């Protein structure tokens, strides 16, 4: 498997400017150790660092006034992931606020002809549109955009008429904070989402197994977008929007490690690391562990 790690230094669409530093901090402090560990273990992963896509401005921006800036930022990221995918690489994007998902997955989907599946692991549904968002921050809207709803300049960024994602190949895991319009939208579209209550009732292994089967059935392969705020903030405090009652990182990593069909992965994304809220580096150290669990086949 040929892997290209790509930073997305985005924060303008998010809740805290610190998350734009995530790719650089990861590149300096964790990537070299992670890469050496892979080499020592003789893993069949060919990894290279593909650089960092930086947004135009670090200042907080909101829709609709900043739509053109968000479009330019995500278009640049889209071109990078599309190029990597067409070159036979597996893009692994390190963000950055979750609005970068628009560029990540629009680019990966544009590089192929068949529908793409996506597993969205997050404490939030990220499914607002400008019509329902109180904050008008883009980090609360990327999943809706990828499903073809919301700001038209972003939903049609690739130039194609069809949405980036088809609902039948999309699932959301770990949700525990949302506004009522978001589950209503996903239910109308037919996207399966699993709240923290359902995970407690059924168990995390059963939920991930079910969701993984759903997204991996997509004809064009699938990807995973993992927001670190899905984790318990007592164990992973370095995120911009922490929510109590999150998943245990060790359990999540173990379950992801044993999922099948990883040869059908078309991209990964791990976002919302905020180094300014992670003074001891404990959230940063979880990132390579989760990345390895998602990439390695068992």
Image (spheres, grey):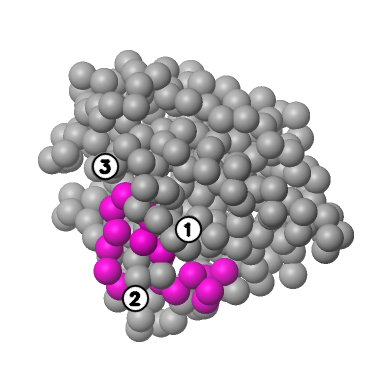
Circle 1 is placed at which residue position?
Answer: 281
| Label located before the other in sequence (3 or 1) | 3
In terms of image quadrants, where is residue 248? Answer: bottom left
In terms of image quadrants, where is residue 4? Answer: top right
Magenta: predominant secondary structure element? loop
Q: Which is in the foreground here, disc 3 or disc 1? A: 1
Residue 117 place in picture, x, y as percent: 54, 49
Find the distance from the CA under tag 3 to the CA under tag 1.
20 Å
Under circle 3, the secondary element is: loop
Drawn side of residue 51 relative to residue 133, left or right = right
| Label located before the other in sequence (2 or 1) | 2
Drawn side of residue 37 relative to residue 287, left or right = right
Considering only vertical position in the picture, is 231 above or below 16?
below
Q: What stretch is highlighted in magenta?
A: 236-253
Q: Which residue lies furthest to the left in this view?
A: 134
Find the distance from the CA under tag 3 to the CA under tag 2.
27 Å
Find the distance from the CA under tag 2 to the CA under tag 1.
31 Å
| Residue 248 lies in the magenta-colored region | yes
Circle 3 is placed at which residue position?
Answer: 15
Q: Which is in the foreground here, disc 3 or disc 2? A: 3
């Amino acid at each position: 498997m040929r892997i290209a790690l790509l930073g997305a230094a985005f924060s303008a669409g998010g809740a805290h400017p610190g998350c734009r530093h995530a790719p650089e901090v990861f590149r300096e402090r964790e990537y070299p150790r992670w890469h050496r560990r892979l080499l020592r273990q003789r893993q069949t992963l060919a990894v290279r660092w593909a650089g960092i896509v930086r947004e135009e401005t670090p200042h907080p921006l909101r829709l609709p006034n900043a739509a053109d800036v968000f479009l330019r930022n995500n278009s640049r990221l889209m071109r990078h992931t599309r190029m990597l995918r067409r070159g036979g690489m597996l893009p692994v994007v390190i963000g950055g606020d979750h609005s970068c998902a628009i560029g990540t997955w629009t680019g990966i989907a544009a590089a192929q002809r068949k529908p793409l599946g996506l597993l969205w692991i997050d404490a939030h549904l990220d499914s607002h549109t400008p019509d329902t968002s109180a904050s008008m921050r883009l980090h609360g809207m990327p999943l809706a955009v990828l499903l073809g709803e919301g700001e038209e300049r972003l939903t049609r960024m690739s130039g194609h008429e069809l949405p980036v994602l088809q609902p039948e190949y999309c699932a959301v895991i770990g949700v525990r904070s949302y506004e009522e319009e978001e589950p209503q939208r996903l239910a109308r579209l037919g996207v399966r989402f699993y709240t923290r209550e359902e995970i407690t009732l059924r168990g995390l292994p059963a939920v991930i197994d079910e969701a993984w089967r759903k997204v991996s059935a997509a004809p064009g392969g699938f990807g995973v977008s993992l927001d670190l705020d899905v984790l318990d903030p007592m164990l992973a405090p370095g995120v911009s929007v922490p929510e109590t009652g999150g998943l245990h990182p060790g359990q999540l990593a173990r379950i992801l490690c044993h999922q099948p069909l990883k040869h059908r992965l078309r991209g990964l994304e791990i976002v919302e690391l905020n180094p300014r809220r992670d003074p001891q580096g404990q959230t940063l150290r979880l990132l390579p562990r989760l990345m390895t669990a998602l990439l390695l086949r068992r």
